Image (cartoon, helix red, strand yellow):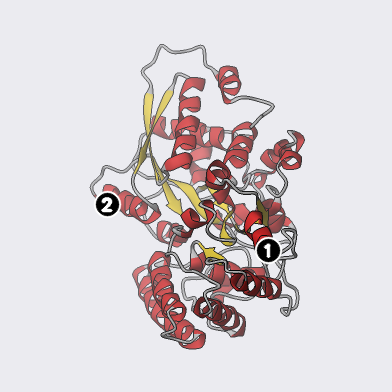
Amino acid sequence: MKHSISLLAFAAGLTSASGVWAQTEIEFWHAFTGRLGELVAEQVETFNASQSDYVVNASHKGNYSETLNAGIAAFRAGEQPDILMVFEVGTATMMAAQGAIKPVYEVMEDAGATFNADDFIGSVKGYYTTTDGKMLSMPFNSSTPVLWVNRDALTAAGIDPDVDLSTWENVDTVLGELKAAGNTCPMTTAWQSWIHLENLSAYHNTPFATKDNGFAGTDTELVFNGPLQVQHIGKMGEWAKDGEFIYAGRRNEGGANFRAGECALFTESSAGYAGIKAEATFDFDVRPLPYWSSVEGAPQNTIIGGASLWVMAGQSDEDYKGVAAFLNFLSSPEIQAKWHQDTGYLPITKAAGELTREQGFYEANPGTDVAVIQMTAKEPTANSKGLRLGSFDQIRGIIDEELEAVWAGDKDAQTALDSAVERGNALLRRFEQATK
């Protein structure tokens, strides 16, 4: 992959001539392994080589949930890192952690760093800022769900690989044709709650929860058991029963099946690009997430997943200066453009997206701008700017349990979603009481 500016050249341009003082160490805990872990290590190495005042030590602490729990435990023990990666469903938890975090806007102000939250694209910025636009955590790896297509599998089934898959109605037809042709995995998915309930709701401008999906207060209630959600999960239950949808697991277990060429269609994060491009031996496309054409106004916009970087409280002023320098480095146009192009994560700043287009990346790699267009084509609404719910990781676990009952044929969609809402609301009430 070619870039107009290499990381080494960028680092050389930033190299500081001063090296007489001892370097301040910055501890950065993250959740990435595999190719993404390698790319994070490359970013850290480039930053460390670009100046001589600070050295960032990056440590992998497990998956998203494990990394969040490790950070909480470390803070309680007084051994917290400077920077902690937290997935988007942990946002409300971090906001409620009184005294545990130092907001990014304060870090930047105190360090005297040049920083403007308006440089970030709106659909990303809004997730991690206060209602008056103050950034609490730094967006890092922001993605949105798309539809990955194995063109060879469609061709093998006698289906035009350019078939219109923009709507779920069309997908329904193609899944039946794939099954009839003998395909054993017409469709699979990753992150079922994020894609098929959270993003489904946003994409159709339908509330997932009250109070602007939690942005307007902790006294929010879940409402994802409405007609749209029941229709969609009910249809997926039919596909599961007919062998047209193959459930592989709660996280991204289905990714291995798709990358191996076993599945024709795959709903997954745009960040699946890194692994799919590296491993797939078949011709593939990335398409927009399908929508139900019967819903007026659809599609709206999808919402982000991924994680942001939270700065932990209790560190020295010199540490925070180093943190500010590292965060500005990560959000710089050159570094962000390369990260976007290597991973499929969104370019979190407008400048990074413009640079990527100028470099000809989208033209050379058709479809890689799908996620960006899908997120930015329409201004987000109260129903589509994101979700900010307490105990959301646990709520997702409840949703997973209920959806698995639908896929197994043990519950109908309405019963399962009613149960998930009731159980989830009980957690929200406990979270609300704990934050008062």
**Number of numbered tags placed on the structure image:** 2
Q: Position of residue 116 (x, y in %)?
A: 63, 42
Which is closer to the viewer, label 2 or label 1?
Answer: 1
- Amino acid beneath label 1: Asn
Residue at 52 percent of width and 16 percent of height: 16
Q: Position of residue 208 (x, y in %)?
A: 55, 74
- Amino acid beneath label 2: Ala
| Direction from residue 76 to residue 104 in the image, left or right | right
At mark 2, the secondary structure is: helix
Give the quadrant of the N terminus.
Answer: top right
Q: Which residue is mark 2?
A: 73
Tell whether label 1 touches label 2 (CB within 8 Å): no
Q: Which of disc 1 and disc 2 is earlier in sequence? A: 2
Q: Which residue is mark 1?
A: 301
Q: Residues within 10 Å of mark 2 (few under 14, many from 20)?
A: few
Q: Position of residue 302 (x, y in %)?
A: 64, 62
Residue at 47 percent of width and 76 percent of height: 219
Q: Position of residue 10 (x, y in %)?
A: 60, 23
Q: Is residue 238 above or below residue 64?
A: below
Residue at 42 percent of width and 71 percent of height: 400
At mark 1, the secondary structure is: loop
Give the quadrant of the C terminus.
Answer: bottom left
Q: Is residue 104 above or below residue 254?
A: above
Residue at 46 percent of width and 26 percent of height: 45
Does residue 387 show up?
no
| Direction from residue 259 to residue 249 in the image, left or right | left
Q: Residues within 10 Å of mark 1 (few under 14, many from 20)?
A: many
Does residue 420 show up?
yes
